[in-house]
Image (tube, rainbow, N blue to C red):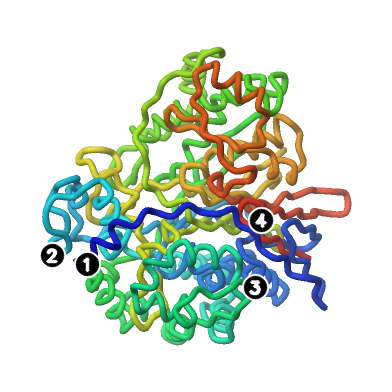
Amino acid sequence: MLSRKIVSLLFVVFLLFSVRLVGGSQDVITVAPAAEGGEAMVVAAHPLAARVGVEILKNGGNAVDAAVATAFALGVVEPEASGLGGGGFMLIYVAETGKTVGINYRTTAPAAATPDMFALNGPGLSGYWDGPMSIMEQTALRKIGGGGVAVPLMLSGMDAALQKYGTMTLSDVLAPAIKLAEDGFPVSDPLYHNILNNYMLIVEDPELSKVLLHDDLPYEPGEIMRMPDLARSFRTIASMGVDAFYHGALADAIVDGVQEYGGILTKEDLAQAHATTCEPIVGSYRGHKIVTMPPPSSAVTFIQILNILEKFDLESLGQETAATIHRMAEAYKLAFAYRDAYVGDPDFADVPLKDLLSKELAADLCSRIDPNRAHPNPAPGSLEGNDTTHISVIDQDGNMVALTQSLNSFMGAKFIVPGTGILMNDTMADFNPEIGTVNSIAPGKAPVSSMSPAFLFRDGAPFLILGSPGAQRILTTIVELIVNMVDFHMTLQEAMDAPRFFCHDDTLYIEARIPAKVQTVLEERGHPISKRGAYDLYFGGAHVIQVANGEEGPSYFGVADPRRGGQAAGY
């Protein structure tokens, strides 16, 4: 039974992150918030992880090898955002063939899941909760403890990518993560703040305390944290393969741990878990080709937004003007309404992708936008975790990877499987708790996700590798980056730094840097405004690589979002 003290805790309000830069090294690898390179580039949420990816490339690995090694390393140095206990999506471009493939390793509902398991004042989970639930208690049931745990597929996704498109072994790409976990790493400012924000939950849990606290207090930034249990789990996987996680002793420990925390995950769920390959979806924007993930990713939504915006002359309307922001906000609301109504796991729902991607539908939606007045849209809220991570990679041969993965919330379900170092996801919270919707709970079903790794091609050649954390703001962040570069001709750095905004329901969320006079006009047009920080984590943390094709060959420019504190590494 969950402690009512834990349930009563309010969810975290995250601070604007900052990460100290890694200084110059003796090799030729550049690690900084923005970096240029003529050979290869990795952009990730931590300098040590970005460096791991580039060192894999320098040692002969390709983009897939580097992305997988970086993902494992992030599970150590950024454990709060992703790892073995979660899942995600990977997009792979093979330069030799010019083809792109997707790998879906989104977490799925356990076989014992039921459509009403999170219904307000419903049955809850047997033996897990007694009596009627308040809304806050229902939220805790979905976000804290074993009830929120979906079947983890991160390892299966990494293995599938390596087996089909990599050149190195699982043992090879796990080695840097094992070293980081065993030898230790300096705690970053983001990790410190996440531990601090969740301190009351962590200090009450012996396993979380053992891993994330030092003498019952958070590690200070720069102090060395070690993860010997996670290192042992990695070593077991490196020597025995993925079966150790999905069938062996690790599987037993994971199931026992999740059930101890009140969850319904079973050994059969893990034994049947597997990532799948999929055909990407394709769109266009002002002559640029967009390639991204199909459902259960909702990347189709950002393409639909761009289809609507293509009908407007945004360049003439101006960047950071009320006219442009109003039209974009209205396009967001319309596209999100279609997402909520139609986008789900395609194995369980008939998702009308052709219609959602059509320019004809976009033209009709565009005609519904009043240029002078906001349309009311009391859309439902979302518990989708915004605490995700994204990796962008390009190698010496032009192969590309865009990878977005998550535990859903920071610290996932707020527990570590005893003895393994593995933080578990709370992805079940991404389902709609109501019965009969496209995103309702069903056994084996993946909840709809905003994670949307993407490639943008210009004149048939790779131009951008992009993606972001940030829940629904992932979709609008990608839109705003593309609009800033295509319509307003910004550099990648300028596009990344530009003020962001988001609208799903009636409220228009904006970064405070948007001029006051613009805010006034938007309010006059009917947009209730919620002002966030100047560079606010709420709006994601994009990691993007731009490809420039010159006479002497391609060059790469990697930029990490200042809102998240990521790093680019290249040579």
- Closer to the chain start, of discs 1 and 4, is 4
Residue position marked by numbered label 1 in the rendering: 262
Which element type, helix, strand or loop, lies under badge 2?
loop
Kindly identify which numbered label has been placed on residue 127: 2
Say which quadrant the N terminus sits in: bottom left
Kindly identify which numbered label has been placed on residue 95: 4
Distance Cα–Cα, label 4 vs label 3: 22 Å
- Evaluate if marks 1 and 2 touch, with contact meaning CB atoms under 8 Å apart: yes
Say which quadrant the C terminus sits in: bottom right
Going by the image, does 561 lie left or right of 452? right
- Closer to the chain start, of discs 4 and 3, is 3
Distance Cα–Cα, label 3 vs label 1: 36 Å
Residue at the (15%, 47%) spot, across then down: 121
Give the x, y percent position of residue 406. 46, 59
Residue at the (62%, 69%) spot, across then down: 49
Give the x, y percent position of residue 90. 51, 57
Distance Cα–Cα, label 3 vs label 2: 44 Å
- Evaluate if marks 3 and 2 touch, with contact meaning CB atoms under 8 Å apart: no
Residue position marked by numbered label 3 in the rendering: 52
Q: Residues within 10 Å of mark 4 (few under 14, many from 20)?
A: some
Of badges 3 and 2, the one in the foreground is 2
Residue type indicated by callout 1: Gly
- Closer to the chain start, of discs 3 and 2, is 3
Distance Cα–Cα, label 4 vs label 2: 53 Å
Name the image quarter holding residue 93. bottom right
Of badges 3 and 1, the one in the foreground is 1
